[in-house]
Amino acid sequence: MKRLLATMAMTLILCLGISAQDNDKNAIFTKPKFSGFAMATYQATFQDSGNSNSFDLRLIRASFEGRILNDFYYKIQGQLNGNQTTLGSSPRLVDYFMEWQKLDYLKVRLGQFKRPFTFENPMNPIDQGFMSYSQPVSKLAGFSDRCGEHACNGRDIGLQLQGDLLKNSAGRYLLHYQVGVFNGQGVNMKDVDEKKDIIGGVWVMPIAGLRIGAFGWEGSYARKSGGEIVSLNKHRYALSGEYKKGDLQLRAEYVHSTGLGFATTYQKSENASDVTIKTYSKDGVPVANDKADAFYALAIVPVVADKLMAKARYDIYRPTASSVAAKTNYEIGFNYRFCKYLEVQSEYVLTNDRSLDKHNYSSVFLQVSIRY
């Protein structure tokens, strides 16, 4: 935590100092913009094995961004809440990158940032609109990934190229591409197997607000045990569609994955050497399954313009690409926006989890989000 705060503070002080001539168009630095958000939640789960309810600080983020020589954009973002005992819950640096943005058709980004995989992954947690990111993104884009890496909020360290092409007469681009090379180990981690992940996507925008895209991911996740490196392959693709106009959001994505996962999630130092492969029970026999897929479809519809939105989502994850251990969420709720800085989100979820003896249970969820 101290290291995170010190890094952000020193960089901010440096940028503020150099931006003294902010009104000068020839200034090296522009004045950094400071922003962030905080999300507090209450969740109650009603389950035969035992009910639970709790208040929680889901996320507290602080970031600042700016430009150098006008063409270079940078962003630094830290997660401030959490504890010091696990990687997945600890305060940490989540974004730290610079991007050359002189050309619309070619932008170059270097550092730690979101993996270019799926439409939902890059979204701000508040704008995403639901109690959490969908299972396709959570399990197959690097949040609580099935491969066993620590919680990475969909991010990794690497180099990415992206751009927009084919501008129409209205000045709107019709095609977007992005492709990157990454370590494959998640945030704040060096490479282990010296192999790199290649992740990319392309989408078309035939009419305003509509995106139709496809993504691919070839890579690996590795651990080292007793001097031996165990590397698990990741072969993934996603098909995505979205229509967005104002507060109206319609989105669906399918993700397929081939590749085994480690049995333990990397949360503590001792997990880094645990190379046990995760298995699933099939007819009472443990089986290591290398196939998984997931799908979600959602709608967020304005009821009162700029104020009240109704929402629904169907969300399924199949860790064996079959009904074995499949988990499905049926979600409905409302979001109310007092102003652009304050929003309340509510939700009811019916879950069918086939890995449990009693498959069905329900949850209620309330979240207050602020931006600053």
Image: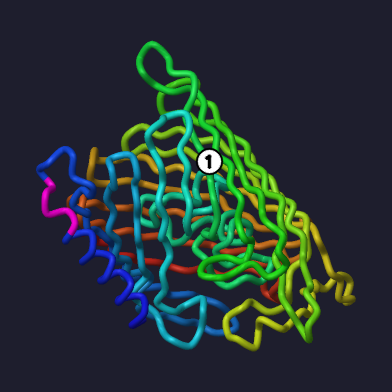
Q: Which quarter of the image is occupied by the C terminus? A: bottom left
Q: Is the magenta stretch mostly helix, strand or loop?
A: helix
**Within-10-Å neighbours for mark 1: few <14, some 14–19, many 20+:** some
Q: Which quarter of the image is occupied by the N terminus? A: bottom left
In this view, 186 is above or below 127: below
In this rendering, would 368 be left or right of 318? left
Q: Mark 1 points at which residue?
A: 161
The boundaries of the magenta stretch are 18-22
* 19 is within the stretch colored magenta: yes
In this rendering, would 159 be left or right of 261? left
The residue lying at 12 percent from left, 41 percent from top is: 24
The residue lying at 79 percent from left, 75 percent from top is: 277
Task: Tell me where residue 235 appears, x and y as whole percent.
Answer: 74, 52
Q: What element carries label 1?
A: strand
In this rendering, would 327 be left or right of 159? right
What residue type is disc 1 on? Leu
In this view, 81 is above or below 345: below
Asked whether 51 or 223 is in front, the reply is 223
The residue lying at 19 percent from left, 57 percent from top is: 18
Asked whether 212 or 33 is in front, the reply is 33
User: Image quadrant of residue 184?
Assistant: bottom right
Asked whether 335 or 146 is in front, the reply is 146
Residue farthest toward the top in the current orientation of the protein: 169
In this rendering, would 265 be left or right of 175? right
- The colour scheme is rainbow
User: Image quadrant of residue 369?
Assistant: bottom left
Task: Tell me where residue 227 appears, x and y as whole percent.
Answer: 78, 83
Task: Tell me where residue 241 appears, x and y as whole percent.
Answer: 55, 35
The residue lying at 48 percent from left, 59 percent from top is: 112
